[in-house]
């Protein structure tokens, strides 16, 4: 039986680093994971601890987690489309790629950026120039451009824009794509006909460049350009549709990562708990659980 490659966003804490991330993933019965190497909203980063890395890698091996399925996400404040701060962005991403190497991780997801008024074309030019600098090093780590919802002035909300960026990258083997289901739905792709969307992706970008899929339901209707994730089966995309994507034959070797919202215990923002153990269970059972939210509350109470 072939194995579904499924995981979720996990934390990467200064004191436990990779060991903590692997343990968290295992606690959800996942066989992969994605994390920020520090806070997503800033670029303060601790040095990678070699002992924790070794221990984490061993733990992955013992539990059948292929390190090539694990993924780092670049902090979302890096904006290569806006030339004003791209020197900083380039420097930071180069260091981030080094951290990936130290951890043994081969893929880093990046939001292409927002043009903040200078226009899509200029924005794309900036991204290409900056990324070519980032990729000057001799590393093998791949940068995966994420498909975006098109919120504000975000670049990358259609396959053509992603393709334009890729076309300008000199080191083709260093660039790939991460498809986010909530984002493409919010961007206007009708994923009730996912085969057609995938066909389009293949024609424009090439399916072989698809290295990661973010599995999220959406709080908003198609083409809303909102980018608000919802728990699996609780949003406008729906469980059956997401299941078709998760188990799609053409995507079977691509890691699937959940980035769904934490569930609030009391309706407030202070006590929220991860839905992943429960979502992965639903996905493995191929059966929607309409009581999931209550069960999560009960479990973490
Ligand atoms: Fe992202
Ligand atoms: Fe995403
Ligand atoms: Zn998102």
Image: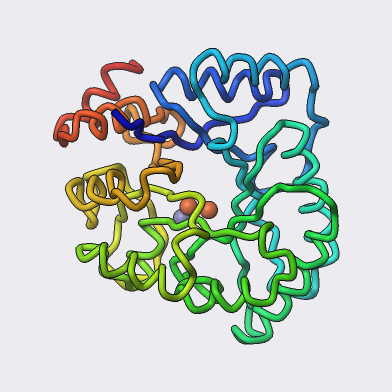
Give the side of residue 119 with respect to residue 239, left or right.
Answer: right
Residue 218, percent from left and from top: 31, 55
In the image, 240 versus 39, the foreground residue is: 240
Q: Is residue 102 left or right of residue 244?
A: right
- In the image, taking residue 268 as reference, residue 62 lies left or right, namely right
Vertically, is 62 above or below 108? above
Residue at x 30% of width, y 33% of height: 279
Q: Quadrant of the C terminus?
A: top left
The x, y position of residue 205, in whole percent, is: 49, 70
Q: Is residue 39 above or below residue 193?
A: above
Residue positioned 46% across, 31% down in the render: 270
Instruction: Give the vertical position of 174 relative to 54 (above or below).
Output: below
Q: Quadrant for residue 39, please give it.
A: top right
Nearest the viewer among 164 and 150 is 164
Residue occupying image coordinates x 29% and y 24%: 296
The colour mode here is rainbow
Residue 194 lies, in percent from the top left, at: 26, 62
Quarter of the image containing the N terminus? top left
Which residue is at the front of the view, 47 or 41? 47
Residue 122 percent coordinates (x, y) = 68, 85
Residue at position x 55%, y 74% from top? 163
């Amino acid at each position: 039986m072939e194995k579904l490659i499924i995981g979720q966003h996990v934390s990467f804490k200064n004191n436990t680093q990779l060991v903590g991330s692997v343990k968290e993933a295992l606690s959800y019965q996942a066989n992969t994971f994605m994390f920020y190497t520090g806070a997503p909203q800033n670029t303060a980063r601790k040095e990678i601890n070699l002992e924790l890395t070794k221990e984490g890698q061993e733990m992955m091996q013992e539990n059948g987690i292929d390190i090539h399925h694990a993924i780092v996400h670049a902090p979302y404040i890096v904006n290569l489309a806006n030339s004003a701060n791209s020197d900083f962005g380039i420097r930071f991403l180069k260091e981030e790629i080094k951290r990936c190497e130290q951890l043994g991780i081969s893929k880093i997801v990046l939001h292409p950026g927002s043009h903040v008024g200078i226009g899509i074309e200029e924005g794309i030019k900036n991204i290409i120039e900056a990324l070519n600098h980032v990729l000057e090093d001799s590393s093998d780590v791949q940068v995966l451009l994420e498909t975006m919802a098109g919120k504000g002035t975000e670049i990358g909300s259609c396959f053509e824009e992603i393709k334009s960026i890729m076309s300008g990258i000199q080191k083709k083997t260093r660039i790939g794509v991460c498809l986010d289901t909530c984002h493409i739905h919010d961007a206007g792709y009708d994923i009730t006909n996912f085969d057609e969307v995938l066909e389009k992706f293949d024609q424009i970008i090439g399916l072989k460049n698809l290295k990661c899929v973010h599995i999220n339901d959406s709080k908003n209707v198609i083409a809303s350009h909102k980018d608000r994730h919802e728990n699996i089966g609780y949003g406008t995309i729906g469980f059956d549709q997401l299941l078709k994507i998760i188990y799609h034959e053409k995507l079977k070797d691509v890691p699937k990562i959940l980035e769904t919202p934490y569930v609030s215990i009391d309706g407030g923002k202070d006590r929220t708990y991860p839905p992943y153990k429960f979502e992965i269970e639903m996905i493995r059972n191929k059966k929607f659980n309409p009581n999931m939210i209550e069960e999560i509350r009960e479990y973490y109470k």
